[in-house]
Amino acid sequence: MAFNQKDIISIRDFDKKDIEYILKLAKEMEPIARSEKKSDALSGKLLGMLFYEPSTRTRLSFEAAMKRLGGSTIGFAEAGTSSATKGENLTDTVRIVGEYSDALVIRHNMEGTARFVANIVDVPVINAGDGAGQHPTQTMLDLYTMKRILGRIDDLRIALVGDLKYGRTVHSLAYALAKFDVDVSFVSPKELKMPREILHDLSKSGVDVYETENIHEVLDKTDVLYVTRIQKERFPDPAEYLKIKGAYTITSKLLEGSDAIVMHPLPRIDEISHDVDNTPQGRYFEQAFYGVPVRMALLKSVIK
Ligand code: CP
């Protein structure tokens, strides 16, 4: 089994069958995530959680997932409370916490950190986001949301909207979608286009790449609008961020005449108007909940 005691670093390390296995297991986890059933599948196991960058959903849904399965968590939500402030390096920290835990979840602002850590520790390492790199567990829950709401992933028309340059969720998701039979459009300001090397990889995998700056071009030909935040913290020059800020705002008026569901990895700033929240199309809070059953499925699969 692809996930048995394996690291989860990049979605590219898994094939369609592996992903479908996790989505199926996540469905079985849902009653436990909703507190309708109990499980002690990970009783006595400890998950180490090292968050060098802020997080709400990823950190708390991993914690909820572990606890729903009878396990426990240790770790920190910001490096400022760890001995990193005294000058301890990452290698020493992860080596220690790896010894204390049965698996490690790490988020860091530097791309490649999770892979680096996986080469140091003996327990499975899960990438909870590495800079503008990858966010593979977010991708699994994104795919689960599509399948859960629309009944399938194959044959969907999906538009990725917003910051496609710095957004790790869209980088991971684009690679995952390339494993399915889907139409993908990329909607972004010209300054925030999907990196050329990712587009090149997608073309090589047989994906028809369509790029536009105009969201109106895709609205009536899209099943899923996957909207992302402009990643202010990754801009080298704050003036560049201010020029692009607010480039797209999805409102219920904009969605009139479109059947697309609206997804967003969250947090949202101003790219989806609050008037979309309670419409049948706004599905991002449901999407955030699915982080729990999907991460339960992943933890159950990787922890011995
Ligand atoms: N989607 C996501 O990664 O959210 P957090 O940054 O709150 O974990």
Image (cartoon, helix red, strand yellow):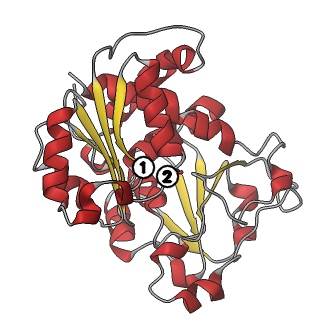
Residue 23 or residue 237, whichever sits in front = 237
Label 1 crowd (10 A; few <14 / some 14-19 / many >=20): some
> What is the x, y in percent for residue 62?
43, 35
Quadrant containing the N terminus is top left
In contact (CB < 8 Å): disc 2 and disc 1? yes
- Element carrying mark 1: loop
Q: Residue at x 58, y 91 (%)?
A: 239
Judge whether 157 appears above or below 232 on screen.
Answer: above
Quadrant containing the C terminus is top left
**Label 2 CB-ligand 1 distance < 8 A:** yes
Judge whether 273 appears above or below 236 on screen.
Answer: above
Q: Which residue is mark 2?
A: 55
- Element carrying mark 2: loop
Q: Which mark is residue 228?
A: none
Query: What is the CA distance from the residue labelled 2 to the residue labelled 1?
Result: 8 Å
Q: Which residue is mark 1?
A: 77
Judge whether 295 appears above or below 95 on screen.
Answer: above
Counting residues from the start of the chain, the first of labels 2 and 1 encountered is 2
Q: Residue at x 78, y 47 (%)?
A: 259
